Structures are given as structure tokens and as C-alpha cells.
Amino acid sequence: MLRGLARAAAQRYGAPRPRGCGSGAGVPVHQVDLRSDTVTKPGPAMRRAMAEAVVGDDDYGEDPTVRELQEKAAKLLGVERTLFVPTNTMANLISVMGHCQRRGSQLLLGQECHLHVYEQGGVAQIAGVHSHPLPDLPHGTLDLADLERMVTRGLGSPYHPVCELICLENTHSSSGGRVLPIDYLHQVHRLARSYGVRVHLDGARLMNAAVALRVSPARIVEHCDSVSLCFSKGLGAPVGALVGGPKDFIEGAWRLRKALGGGMRQAGVLAAAALVGLADAEEVLLRDHQNAQRFARGLQELASPICSVDVAAVETNVVMVTVDGLAPEELCRRLRAVSAAEVAQTGRAVRVLLFPWSERSVRAVWHRDVSAQDTELALRKWEFVLRQLGP
């Protein structure tokens, strides 16, 4: 069960010290930040692209770099049009508003999905849409029988809200970056169409899913009526997301973006970063996945009674670590701390940053700023902390 511990942990632990700062023992500290793939910094190529971007007024549709990004993304996703927006939260909200134009419409989604838990209930607060959460299965899927029961409950009923939209999340963050199977997506879309319901895909980490499945993103999106894609997670851009779908849907999304304050001017400096992130996505994300899996196997080999991981569940760049006999907050504190004993025993000082995820787990997320060497250092730090805690 999610408890919103990440924000409390951030406040409790304060801002992280920069990489390479002193340990108090006179040894430079190496910092490995596994809190999220949102912490990436633009590299030299991305910064250069941003500085040299050709720009115009995107609110007038006149920014050539934004147009280039939207056209390339549309081809990549196999949709007619896309629209560049500031955040994936806005992309999801625009999509829900575009599909559910009657106040009181019902949206079905997983109870632990990002749209339901981490987006302030914006679909209700702003769009007047009633979201009904269903239990998430371990793989991040929803039970199809439950889904159909809820879709049909409002048909012809004067009491229940009418379902107009199903939202899926791929990869599924709260399940540990799990990838929704293509066949499952097909079954959900077929079910939805049989009752006149549409499907939106929260594809914040869609590129991770495509890399893990070894298919094109379009192969995933073809089972959905709209999609969002975030550039500021694994793709490494500082800002930006997009909405994708049919031409008329995106024309409506343009108006909704303006109403929500998302109209931008010389946004090409941001779109340029997203283009660089897309260009090397397959190579970078595959490496992130491999580093996450390497870490999961290494932690499993430690055979600690305190920390365990289901290696088979590590499908992309997220590792969920179950913690027994210790508060996850305390484990995070120890992984963050650097001591003279650590330097004496290991010859180096390492700080690993992450957040508690639930009452019994922590979540570590790999990204382009975490190398194979960083992964090994994080594992050795974990081993050191577990030894300090005893058998």
C-alpha cells in the first residue's frame, strides 16, 4: 500500500549533498541517486541542442523545433498527431478531459496507478470526472471480469455514473516498472470498444516498455485511443511530455492545453532536449534495464534476511526491495550516511539516495546518470549497511 512516504522522506532528509563532497573522513564521497529517473541532468549534447534550437512562438504553432518533435513522435507512436505539453500530469489530464466531456463521466483505472495517486485527483478537481479505482494485479494489470462489470454497471442505470474511459499505465510504476503484455492491451481495447468506451494509456515510461518488449512504441499504442509520453524521466530531458491521438482529438487537446495554462512560447529549447532524448532512447534505456537487473541479482545473492527482491519482477529500470525487521526510512538513512568505519573497511565513501516506497519496501530507479560502475558501488554500499545491521 502506498503511503506517500517519498515527500516526507525528502523533507526529513533534506537536500542531497553534491557528488564528490567530503565525507568528514577526508575522503571524497561518490553519490548514486536512485530516487527516480526524473533526477537526470542534461548532458553536453542535450545542452548544445537546447542552446542552438531554432525557435518560434509555439502558442501560435510557429516553433519549428516543437513541430519537428511532434511530427517525429507521431510517427514513432503510430498516431495521427501529437501535442507537446509541459508535464505528463497535464498530458493525462488533457486526455481525460478530451475523452470525458460530460461532467460526472466515469473513469476506470488502477487504485495504485500514477494518475489516481499522484496527480492530486485533477480529473475530479478540474474536469469533473468520477474516477473509480480497481485493484491492481501484481503485474500492474486489471482483472478483465471486474473491468467489464464496472463498464456495464452504468449502462441504462439512473443511479450509476456512465463509464467513458479506461486508463492504463505502462510501464506500471507502483508495481515496480512492470510491462503490460501486448495481448492484455488488446483484450482491454476489445472490451472497451464493445461498450463504446475509450482507452487512454499513461505512457510516462512507454519507451521503457517498448525496449523491454523489443517492439516499436506504435505496437503498444495501437491498442489505445490516446497516449501520453514523458520526456523528463528515462529520456533525460529537463521538461516536457506529449499527448498523442487522432487529428480531431489533438485539435481539442490544443484548446485544453491553453485553458490549463500549458500554452508555451519559444518552447523549441525544450523540444530540442526531448529530440536528443528520443534519439538515443533504445540504447540508454536498455542499459538502464540491464543495470537494474544486475543490481537485483546482486542483492539476491547477498541472501540477507533484511532485504529481498523478486528478480523475475525486474522488467525495466525499477527495483522494488522488500525490507523486513527494519523501517524502510531507517534503511534509506543508513544508505545515505557516510562514516569513518565505511572508509576504513571499504577504502571509499558512497552515498546512495532513495526514498521509502511503502511500509515494507524501498524503490530504486535506474537512469542514464547511473553507470554500471555506480550500480556496483550501490550494491557494495548495500552490502556494507547490511553487514553493519548484523545477521
Image: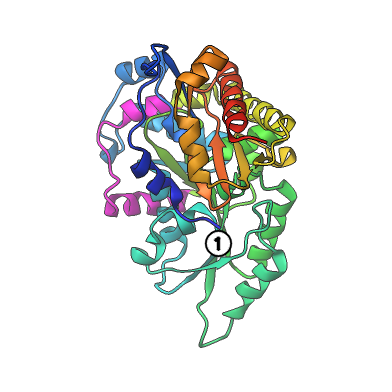
The secondary element bearing badge 1 is classed as loop
Q: In this view, does 209 lie above or below 92?
A: above
Give the quarter of the figure containing the C terminus. Answer: top right
In this rendered view, identify the residue nearer to me: 382 or 243.
382
Dominant SS type (magenta): helix
Expressed as whole percent of the image width and height from the top left, the position of residue 262 reads 30, 46
Against 335, residue 141 (above or below) is: below
Q: Is residue 293 above or below residue 253?
A: above
Q: Which residue is drawn at 64% across and 51% down?
A: 223
* Quarter of the figure with residue 336: top left
Q: Is residue 75 visible?
A: yes
**The image quarter in which residue 252 lies:** bottom left
Q: Where is residue 316 in the image (x, y as percent from the top left)?
A: 64, 35
Look at the image and tell me whether residue 35 can be seen: no
Question: Residue at image x 59%, y 35%?
Answer: 389
Residues in magenta, as a range: 247-274
Q: In this view, does 93 lie to the left or right of 110?
A: left
- Front-most of 175 and 6? 6
The residue indicated by pointer 1 is 111
Q: Is residue 267 magenta?
A: yes
